[in-house]
Amino acid sequence: MSETRFWIQRLSKTAVRAFHILGIAGSAGGIFYGVDKTLWLHWWIMAMVTGCLMVIFEIRQSRLWLIQLKGVLTFVKLAMIASFALVPQWKPELFIFVLLMSVVIAHGPAGLRHYSIWHRRRIEDGKGKKKPMNG
């Protein structure tokens, strides 16, 4: 992969992640304080769209992501978010737990993130390197 292509992919992924965090931050006040949904729904939509893009990027790079703890916990977070509809009185607590899980997933040790729930051990693609996003 050329250096130019590498940097385009890297910066694109970073931009999507930045917009995801912005969307989460923008919707947090509405979730925590029960603000009218019309005031923060656009932030929520941004968070969900960029979150879906990040999942697509990860799966395209390695399908192992789906059985690694980092992928599995992402789907657990989505289930917790979906449960907002079932237990709306717990929205703030669920949101806080999802945020804390996100930090652990993103900044935890590789042995935790790459742990396969299927294989019961750390697994990685090839020599531990992901394949290029578009290749």
Image (cartoon, rainbow, N blue to C red):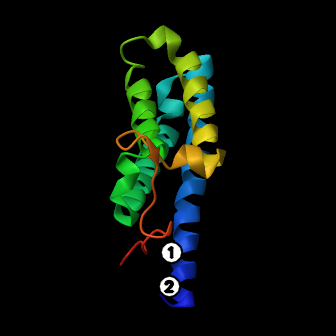
Within-10-Å neighbours for mark 1: few <14, some 14–19, many 20+: some
Seen in the picture, residue 88 relative to 7 is either above or below; the reply is above
Is there a contact, CB below 8 Å, between mark 1 and mark 2? Answer: yes
Q: How far across and how far down the image is residue 20, in percent?
A: 54, 49
Q: 103 or 32, which is in the foreground? A: 103
**Which of the pair 44/3 is nearer the observer?**
3
- Name the residue rendered at 56%, 55% in the picture: 17
Secondary structure of the residue carrying numbered label 2: helix
Q: Is residue 29 above or below residue 86?
A: below
Q: Which mark is residue 133?
A: none
Q: Amino acid at mark 2?
A: Arg
Residue type at mark 1 is Gln
Instruction: Report how far apart the C-alphas of labels 1 and 2 lie in the structure.
Output: 6 Å
Rendering coords of residue 56 (x, y %)? 36, 57
Nearer the observer, 114 or 76: 114
- The quadrant in which residue 108 appears is top right
Closest to the observer: 92 or 35?
Answer: 92
In the rendered view, does 90 fall on the left or right side of 25? left
Q: Position of residue 81 (x, y in %)?
A: 43, 27
x, y percentage for residue 69? 47, 41
Q: Tell me the SS state at disc 1.
A: helix
Quadrant, the C terminus: bottom left
Q: Residue at x 58, y 33 (%)?
A: 101
Residue 5 marker: 2
Which image quadrant for residue 7? bottom right
Residue holding disc 1? 9
Crowd band around label 2 with a 10 angstrom C-alpha radius: few (<14), some (14–19), many (20+): few
